[in-house]
């Protein structure tokens, strides 16, 4: 127990790539420089120096941990403004500085939590306003330089972070739509944990987690994917695909394509040219759509239409395809969440080498589960 307690005191991994260190430091430097120059030009050196420490702490959050809720634009603007008001009120009504300091921290934290704008440097700002004689004498006017430097720092963070490849603020990923236009979640979202599970886990964890809920959900799903990929690393398209294929060609008629699908009980027919290069794909649904013509036709005219129309007129192109070394995880995603029912496999010359269907994926996953369990 003692060893575990001592281990808990050792430095934690920050999980920050080395290349991000200099980027973050440069951003904080530019943000701090802009705030200092702006405040010095507008309000003088004394106010600038008095407010420098809290804004420096804010720069750490906005440029190093910009994805956390503590660095959200609402947190810095509302947190600083709210905490400054707390400091002003405390300076007016609490005469003893030794009592004023803890009261200010308590009031700042509770008010920020109530308004969902928790920003740790704002507590330092509240103390600065409540304990600095120069700021106390300004009264409510102290809010002007505070909101000014908050907006300046936020503007620099928005510009610098996004220009250097760090989205700020992070926008939640757009939910993947169900390709079948139904209310069901996409197949990969029907198993594993859901939003209610995550909410319950956060509740049972019992303490504040400094990460957005959406980011945490995405992190857990990525962890699941990497775990799956690690257990199925040896399974690629080359190991899963069917190799004895039935294909069509661009000049094939709809009637011939229909007969080929019917004969071999297929749902998909790849279309290749004379060099066996993949140029298109036809599905059973594509053919059925062209069988159901808008106006009723006689049998003669229908047969004439089917014989004259060629696959090149209705085939889907370009075709979504994969290569021999495409991992199983990517195949599962393409054949479930993306609404595809079959996936052609091509070689380095773009020649058709195989095809993978949902049935192939199901059989592979079943065999893989038997191996690992």
Image (cartoon, grey):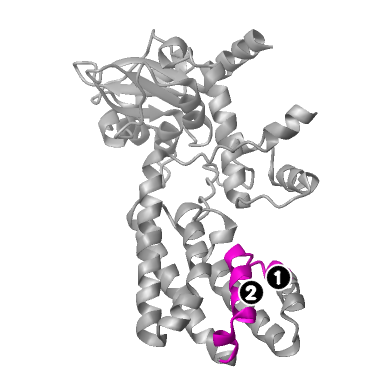
x then y, percent, for residue 284: 45, 28
Relative depth, front residue between 50 and 111:
50
Label 2: element kind = helix
Residue 17's place in the image compared with 65, above or below, is above
User: Could you tell me which quadrant the N terminus lies in?
Assistant: top right
Q: Which residue is mark 1?
A: 105
- Mark 2 nearby-residue class (10 Å; few <14, some 14–19, many ≥20): many
Q: Which residue is mark 2?
A: 127
Residue at (60% x, 52% y) in the render:
212
Looking at the image, tell me whether mark 1 or mark 2 is earlier in sequence order: 1
Residue at (54% x, 62% y) in the render:
72
Label 1: element kind = helix
Instruction: Point out the stretch of residues depicted in magenta.
Output: 109-137
Residue 127's place in the image compared with 20, above or below, is below
Residue at (59% x, 17% y) in the render:
365
Q: Quadrant of residue 35?
A: bottom left
* Residue 201 as seen in the image, left or right of residue 360: right
Residue 58's place in the image compared with 282, above or below, is below
Relative depth, front residue between 317 and 227:
227
Q: Residue 80 got which mark?
A: none
């Amino acid at each position: 127990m003692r060893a575990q307690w001592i281990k808990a005191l050792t430095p934690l991994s920050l999980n920050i790539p080395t290349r991000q260190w200099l980027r973050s430091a440069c951003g904080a430097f530019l943000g701090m420089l802009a705030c200092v120059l702006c405040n010095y030009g507008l309000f003088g050196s004394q106010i600038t120096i008095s407010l420098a420490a809290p804004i420096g702490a804010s720069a750490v959050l906005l440029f190093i941990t910009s994805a956390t809720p503590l660095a959200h634009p609402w947190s810095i603007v509302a947190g600083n403004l709210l905490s400054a008001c707390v400091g002003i009120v405390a300076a007016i009504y609490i005469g003893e500085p030794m009592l004023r300091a803890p009261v200010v921290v308590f009031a700042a934290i509770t008010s920020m939590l109530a308004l969902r704008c928790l920003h740790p440097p704002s507590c330092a700002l509240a103390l600065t306003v409540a304990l600095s004689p120069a700021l106390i004498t300004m009264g409510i006017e102290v809010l002007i330089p505070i909101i000014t430097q908050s907006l300046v720092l936020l503007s620099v963070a928005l510009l610098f972070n996004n220009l250097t490849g760090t989205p700020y603020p992070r926008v939640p990923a757009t939910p993947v739509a169900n390709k079948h236009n139904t209310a069901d979640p996409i197949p990969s979202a029907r198993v594993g944990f859901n939003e209610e599970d995550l909410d319950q886990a956060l509740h049972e964890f019992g303490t504040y987690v400094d990460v957005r809920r959406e980011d945490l959900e995405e992190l857990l799903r990525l962890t699941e994917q990497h775990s799956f990929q690690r257990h199925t690393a040896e399974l690629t398209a080359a190991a899963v695909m069917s190799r004895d294929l039935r294909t069509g060609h661009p000049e094939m008629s709809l009637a011939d394509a229909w007969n080929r699908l019917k004969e071999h009980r297929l749902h998909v027919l790849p279309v290749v040219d004379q060099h066996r290069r993949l140029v298109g794909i036809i599905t059973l649904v594509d053919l059925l759509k062209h069988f159901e013509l808008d106006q009723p036709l006689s049998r003669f005219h229908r047969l004439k239409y089917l014989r004259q129309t060629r696959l090149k007129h209705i085939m889907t192109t370009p075709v979504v395809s994969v290569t021999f070394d495409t991992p199983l995880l990517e195949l599962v995603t393409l054949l479930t969440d993306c609404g595809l029912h079959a996936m052609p496999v091509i070689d380095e010359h773009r020649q058709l080498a195989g095809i993978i269907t949902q049935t192939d994926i199901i059989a592979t996953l079943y065999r893989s589960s038997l191996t690992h369990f």
